[in-house]
Amino acid sequence: MHIPSLIERKREGHPLSSDEIHHLIAAFTSGDMPDYQMSALAMAIFFQGMSSEEISALTDAMLHSGRVLTWPTDAPPRVDKHSTGGIGDKTSLVLAPLLACDGLWIPMISGRGLGITGGTLDKLESIPGFTTQLPIDRVHQIMSSLGCVMIGQTADICPADKKLYALRDVTGTVPSIPLITASIMSKKLAEGLNRLVLDVKHGSGAFMKTREQAQALADSMVRVGHLLGVETTALLNPMDEPTGHSAGNALEVAECVACLQGHGPADLETIILDLATAVTTTPRAALAARLRDGTAWTRFQQMVEAQGGDPATLETLTTTTHPAPVIHELRADRTGTLTRMDAGILGQTVLELGAGRARATDPIDPAVGLDHIAKTGTQIQPGDLLLRIHARTPTAAQSAHHQLLPAITLE
Ligand code: URA
């Protein structure tokens, strides 16, 4: 196949066949197709779009560019969820053990923080000893005994996506629905799933700023999931204020521990139960009961231990293991109803406090972030706590304080 002709065809808005797409991805993965040709193709896709059939072929080709997890034929159904990312979005840590208690298998491959949105792997790594890199035979052992494992993408899973994502990042081709769909779905389907639920966020703290954009991405991912034989559903959730009351790595794990012990924030528990009921027929009340009776909490502790973590640290993670040197309270100076707690600004502040990265190689500070974040709709009196800033230094806390003021509206 003549690659320049295929690029020209897409540039003119004509569809590529499944064989052509598989050929392009194979050539790109092996290095036979240079980055400049793939960049040109990505830009042509950005402007011309792709049909669902083309996106499925692209997803399938990327999915099979590396290892696809396989499971015994008599294994329970494999399910997972993917969130497009948000601020304080910590649902995976609770959902995986909860669904495992339901007899399902959750082979969760997660990512690191991206831009202002936090990453599941970064949160988990605030637990001393916890490893997200496990040999495949250990993954199988943990799945057989516990039904859930939470690991990172390895070099041999979807290598085409790894390469293409890096290229998109520097060629202005990230925000393309066909390319996002293939990127997300190829990584999730490499888990060997039967069912997938997508949590597509929209709002100031999300990748998709409007509900319409989120709906279009959700529709595209659901169509591709079905075309590739995986039961896929999508929920749309606003991300205008953070989920729960905390954002930051150890701080979010602490909030998940509270949720697993039955006293998590109401909005966090609602999203978790919405996602869980999308992939199991078990009644919502029965799932909620597992958050109250200690079953899901026990399973989470077992998973932490199986992945090398120390469960004894979980209840004191923010006070003993990762105490922030400075905790600064931001209090209201007047009366009003809290009508805005802007997730985008809070996310950017948490990132700059050190909980996220500016470059892929930057280290993460597990201790810093925000907690006690008040929820919109709350009646506020002068002196009431709006949030607490966990910072490395007094200067960082002060600068976060100033950055956060325009994020908060009292009316
Ligand atoms: N997350 C991904 O994994 N890929 C994208 O393209 C965008 C978000």
Image: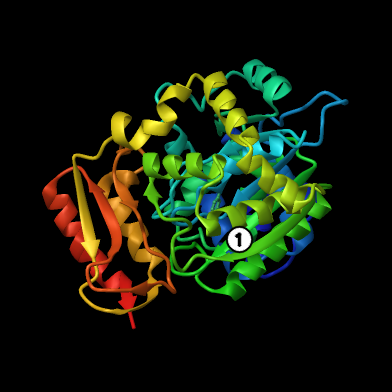
Whether residue 27 is visible, yes or no, is no
Q: Is residue 264 left or right of residue 250?
A: right
Ligand 1 closer than 8 Å to the CB at disc 1? no
Q: Position of residue 57 (x, y in %)?
A: 76, 50
Viewer can see residue 279: yes
Q: In the picture provided, is 73 more to the left or to the right than 167?
A: right
Q: Does 340 sit above or below residue 231? A: below
Left or right of residue 389, residue 280 in this image: right
Q: Image point 18% across, 53% down: which residue? A: 397
Query: How many residues crowd around disc 1 within 10 Å: few (fewer than 14), some, or many (20 or more)?
Result: many
Q: How many marks?
A: 1
Residue 105 lies in quadrant? top right
Colouring: rainbow
Circle 1: element type: strand
Residue at horizontal 36 percent and vertical 59 percent from the top: 373
From the top left corner, tell me how far across and down residue 67 is, in percent: 68, 29
Residue 264, above or below 129: below
Q: Is residue 169 left or right of residue 372?
A: right
Identify the residue at image location x=74%, y=45%: 60
Q: Is residue 240 above or below residue 232?
A: below
Q: Quadrant of residue 155?
A: top right
Residue tagged by mark 1?
200
